[in-house]
């Protein structure tokens, strides 16, 4: 994905405003103030607030897609499951101001185009997690009484809640450690019980 350094700077400032103050606080005026730019300087790179948000979502989806596409399957389905969440948590730990996109606080009210990008981001994460769960069911490691699609939604919703808590506590808890505990807890729930 092509993005200029200045556009990336604007996207990062957008993520900061969204995370700290919410979607209602995101205006070109507030963004220019945050960056110590003129409003016209912002408009040289993006035509509107909507375009900035869309670019931010596309950038995030591209980065998460790259991270998840580089996951190597090692034959241990539970380890693959843990690695999936570990890689996501490491990315967000390094990029905390993108956390707002994980739970889309206020963004879904902005426009249909933004909604499409949010759903695209959700689809990318699901497309890498569901095959792991489906393979675990096929191997008899994970329960099969719930569809792999529903297990994917449950797992991602749990991740989303942990991300919300991390933001709520101002990014102080160790995200990677907490997501590791979450992942292990999910595995306990997902495993087939011996007869």
Image: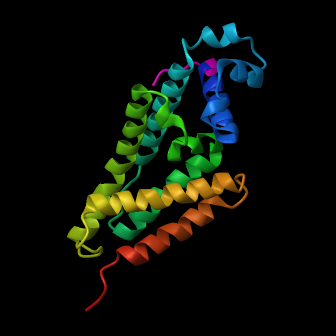
In what quadrant of the picture does the C terminus appear? bottom left
Q: Is residue 143 above or below residue 50?
A: below
User: Viewer-proximal residue, 108 or 190?
Assistant: 108
State the image coordinates of residue 117 (x, y, percent, origin top left).
41, 32
Foreground of the two, 183 or 33: 33
Residue 152 in magenta stretch: no
Magenta stretch secondary structure, dominant? loop
Asked if residue 97 is positioned above or below residue 93 in the image, the reply reads above
| Residue under the point 70% across and 61% down | 173
Residue at the far bottom in the pictured view: 195
Taking the image as drawn, is residue 55 in sight?
yes
Residue 168, percent from left and from top: 67, 54
Drawn side of residue 34 relative to residue 42, left or right: right
Return the residue nearer the eye: 50 or 6: 50
Classify residue 56 as left or right of residue 140. right
Q: Position of residue 128 (x, y in %)?
A: 35, 51
Left or right of residue 193: residue 23 = right
User: Residue drawn 70% across and 40% down?
Assistant: 20
Is any part of residue 12 visible from this angle?
no
Whether residue 55 is situated above or below residue 194 in the rendered picture = above
Whether the magenta-drawn stretch holds residue 5 is answered as yes
Question: Within the image, what quadrant is residue 21 found in?
Answer: top right
Q: Quadrant of the N terminus?
A: top left
Residue occupying image coordinates x 64% and y 28%: 26
Residue at 64% from the left image edge and 18% from the top image edge: 6
Residue 41 rendering spot, x and y as whole percentages:
68, 10
Looking at the picture, the colour scheme in use is rainbow
Magenta range: 1-6
Q: Nearer the viewer, residue 36 or 90?
A: 36
Kindly give the residue lying farthest to the left in the view shown: 138
């Amino acid at each position: 994905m092509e993005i200029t350094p200045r556009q990336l700077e604007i996207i990062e400032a957008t993520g900061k405003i969204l995370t700290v103050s919410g979607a209602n606080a995101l205006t070109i005026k507030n963004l220019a103030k945050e960056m110590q730019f003129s409003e016209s300087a912002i408009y040289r790179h993006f035509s509107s607030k909507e375009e900035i948000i869309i670019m931010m979502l596309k950038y995030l989806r591209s980065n998460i897609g790259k991270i998840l596409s580089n996951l190597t399957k090692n034959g241990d389905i539970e380890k693959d499951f843990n690695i999936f969440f570990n890689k996501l948590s490491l990315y967000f730990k390094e990029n905390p101001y993108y956390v707002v996109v994980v739970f889309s606080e206020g963004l879904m009210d902005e426009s249909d185009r933004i909604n499409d990008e949010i759903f695209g981001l959700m689809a990318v994460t699901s497309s890498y997690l569901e095959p792991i769960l489906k393979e675990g069911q096929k191997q008899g490691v994970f329960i099969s009484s719930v569809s792999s699609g529903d297990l994917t939604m449950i797992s991602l919703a749990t991740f989303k809640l942990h991300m919300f808590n991390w933001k709520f506590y101002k990014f102080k808890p160790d995200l990677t450690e907490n997501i590791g505990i979450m992942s292990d807890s999910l595995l306990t729930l997902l495993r087939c019980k011996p007869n």
